[in-house]
Image (cartoon, rainbow, N blue to C red):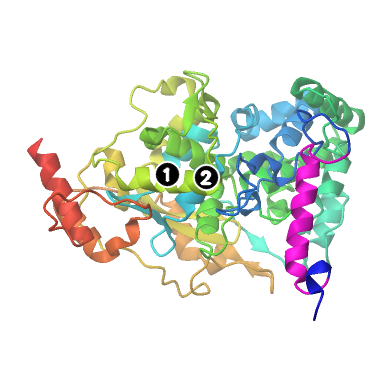
Amino acid sequence: MEGGGDGGGDGGGSRRRTKKTIRRRQAGEGPSGAAHNDPPVVPMEEDTAAAVPGEDEPVGPKKSELWYRLGWAVVRAIYHGLSDFQRAQLEEMGFGPFLRQDELTPDVALIQALKERWDPKCDAFLFPWGHMIPTLEDVVRITGLRADGQAVTGVTYTSYQEQVERLLGLEVTRERSSLVRRMALQASLGVASARRQTGEGQADYMARLTEDAKAVLAEEEGETADRDLRRFLILMIGKLILGTRGDPVSCRCLPLLEDLSSVGSYAWGVALLAHLFDSLGTSSRVTGVAGFFALLQVWAYCHLPSLGRGVPRRLGAVPLLQRWRFCWDECSLRRQVTLIHDALDTTPFGHWTPYVGEADAAQPWVERGRPYFGRDIWLHSINTVVPLHHRLVAGTLGLHQSVVEFPTRQRTWERPGQSFRGIQQETDCTVRVREQLTDWEQRGRQVASEATSDEDYFRAYARRYGAQVYKGSRRPFDPEGQIASLEGILHSTIQQRDDL
């Protein structure tokens, strides 16, 4: 149709131009007269924390591709608004070290690059030097959450309406749903709006939210105080530990919170890792990562320091998440992801023994979790069950990596290709996955290796995964032009290392 370019025709192009104009005006470039250095007022729960310089460039992932709806500032503010006896209860539950940590700016490019290297068939990252995964020791040391205790599992229901009304005094989003509206949950805790006011500093912002929470939260022990504490626990667990990509908050763990005296007996750190593994295993077309991805970020800072993505901020602080801050990068997001892949493709081989010299006496949560470290074990998070194949990363235990049968996801008790989930029917997960739950209760199986060299493992690894481990734009340089496969590259690298 003639004249379509003036307002008709391809509406998509018109919409794209409109959105770009709006975005620039929000940045202070429009006719509003706002100063260019005044940032827009935005809610804390939006994806703005994931923005990076160069986001307007027509290439690379967009900022919305990594959902950042943790709301850490809101959770911390409400935590400080609770009464002393309620904070003491949270300390007894084992959440104290986790809740006292500061927010970590998300390293969007790093998380994106790591997700692109995740293999859901073996629940591990694929790198040129072999498999690599966060372990239970990483979880405990980085977050301060416990890895010992009862598995976080139980019965899932077709509807949580009765329990939410009885224990929280709220409503779920739909009749057959396990989600609570975040804004309603925050409002019940005194923080109806998390918007930062114009010109308001971080300290003033946190103080205001804390005072708003104190104004409505119970000051004396009783049923009202217990209800407030359950509301806070649902917000913390649903937005931090078991966070989802959407805005509503999951309440599937609510049955475990009915008896507040037993909440501290559950292995919440294990649930965090299981939930994160499950999120990483989603389709490659789903670029976001649900769950507490700050764990992945600090894990990479500790284990892959050559990437230079993190900067120490509090030496000696525990848990380890407090030691790091994001090193801001001026490159576009796509450029950052490419550079990270290039760096990973050329990282030298070698064993690593992390956390050498750590003062474990200052971290009692580490000592309690030690019986679960270095083991192949099933991880539980409500109705999600995933394996921790520690035998694939025996190098973290100071062992040589032996050739193992690389695992594949073939579980008859779940739908192919993804963890068992859904609320189509009431399901007792303690019965459905009894074998995996027994494995947890027996602390899995200790990892051992009699190998004296890694070479056989590298050869088997190369044959199994081929060139899929390389994601960057560069490849290891072959001066003789004879290396045509990943197996050859690995073998050449091994020889070069052994000749040093």
Residue 13 lies in the magenta stretch: yes
Residue 383 image position (x, y, % from top left)? 59, 61
Q: Position of residue 465 (x, y in %)?
A: 29, 63
In this picture, residue 360 sits left or right of residue 290: left
The crowding category of the residue bearing disc 2, from other C-alpha atoms within 10 Å (few below 14, some 14 to 19, many at least 20), is many
Q: Which residues are magenta?
A: 8-31
Image x and y of residue 66, in percent: 61, 50
Label annotation for residue 56 = none
Residue at the disc numbered 1: 340
| Residue depicted at 55% across the width and 32% down the height | 328
What residue is shown with label 2?
109
- Residue 71, placed above or below residue 445: above
Mark 2: amino acid: Ala
Query: The N terminus is located in which quarter?
Result: bottom right
Q: Are marks 1 and 2 in contact (CB under 8 Å)?
A: yes
Real-space Cα separation, disc 1 to disc 2, in angstroms: 8 Å
Identify the mark nearer the N-term, 1 or 2: 2
Task: Count residues near mark 1 (Cα–Cα under 10 Å), then give few for <14, some for 14-19, many for 20+.
Answer: many
Q: Residue at x 52, y 21 (%)?
A: 313
